[in-house]
């Protein structure tokens, strides 16, 4: 029998074994239940006490021994009802607690939140860019496109540009170094430099992503979620954009 449903009712694996064993055997001693469940006698006794507390096992004395017996399985509905009542009580208390938690959350809102991404997770950064921009009013992001990183950026998301265009998300690109092409809903300007650059910077609503190559020439990323950082980067980008041909 699948014990996962019992586990969802709060049973441990051993509790489920003892309970099911008791249902099969009928009135039984601790010793017999321990043997059939392959659980030591002391643990089996503790489990039976726990099942008694749940209201689904009882006992009676036969001669000098205790005999344990499972209550009607209908009693399991009482466990569900008890859990529902407890959750309703917690939910009611949350009504009072949530405003306090929100106040704490807002107090921390000025602190940047940084999330880090390994080489096989860069596609998650790109997915976040599209999701965030799609839900924003501007539906636009800005990017410093580094020549030394372009070949790695879309490796796990080769259809990125097609998806971006389908979602109606635009982009302004300042390309650092040579290369790059227009795909649709995009504008591109070039910033000439003699230095190699291995960092992409993506500026999108409320967030700034930095994607670089590590010592193994693998792309890694960090996304900083903070309106202040984003607005500063956006201001710098827009002023540089105006100065470029």
Image (cartoon, rainbow, N blue to C red):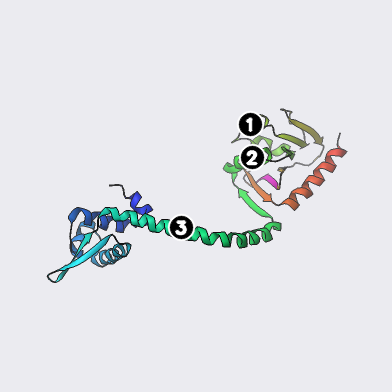
Task: Using the rendered view, name the quadrant where residue 148 is placed.
Answer: top right
Residue 209 among magenta residues: yes
Q: Which residue matches tag 3?
A: 87
Mark 2, mark 3: which one is toward the viewer? 3
**Position of the C terminus by quadrant:** top right
Horizontal side of 189 relative to 221 (left or right) equals right
Horizontal side of 127 relative to 1 (left or right) equals right
Residue 88: percent from left, percent from top: 47, 57
Q: Is residue 227 above or below residue 176?
A: below
Q: Identify the residue at image location x=60%, y=35%.
A: 157
Mark 2, mark 1: which one is toward the viewer? 2
Horizontal side of 163 relative to 36 (left or right) equals right
Horizontal side of 35 relative to 101 (left or right) equals left
Magenta-tinted stretch: 207-214
Q: Nearer the viewer, residue 9 or 193?
A: 9
Q: Which residue matches tag 1?
A: 163
């Amino acid at each position: 029998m699948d014990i996962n449903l019992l586990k969802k009712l709060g049973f441990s694996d051993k509790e489920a074994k003892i309970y099911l064993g008791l249902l099969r055997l009928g009135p039984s001693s601790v010793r017999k239940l321990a043997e059939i469940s392959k659980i030591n006698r002391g643990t089996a006794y503790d489990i039976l006490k726990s099942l008694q507390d749940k209201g689904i096992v009882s006992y009676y004395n036969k001669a000098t021994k205790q005999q344990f017996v499972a209550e009607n399985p209908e009693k399991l509905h009482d466990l569900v009802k008890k859990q529902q009542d407890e959750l309703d009580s917690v939910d009611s208390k949350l009504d009072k607690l949530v405003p306090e938690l929100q106040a704490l959350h807002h107090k921390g809102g000025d602190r940047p939140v940084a999330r880090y991404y390994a080489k096989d997770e860069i596609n998650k950064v790109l997915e976040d860019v599209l999701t965030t921009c799609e839900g924003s009013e501007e539906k636009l992001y800005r990017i410093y496109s580094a020549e030394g990183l372009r070949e790695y950026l879309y490796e796990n998301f080769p259809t990125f540009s097609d998806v971006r265009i389908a979602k109606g998300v635009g982009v302004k690109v300042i390309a650092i170094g040579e290369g790059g092409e227009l795909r649709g809903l995009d504008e591109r300007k070039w910033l000439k430099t003699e230095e190699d650059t291995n960092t992409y910077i993506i500026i999108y609503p409320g967030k700034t992503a930095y994607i670089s190559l590590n010592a193994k020439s693998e792309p890694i990323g960090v996304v900083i979620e903070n309106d202040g950082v984003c607005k500063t980067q956006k201001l710098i980008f827009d002023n540089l954009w105006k100065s470029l041909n």
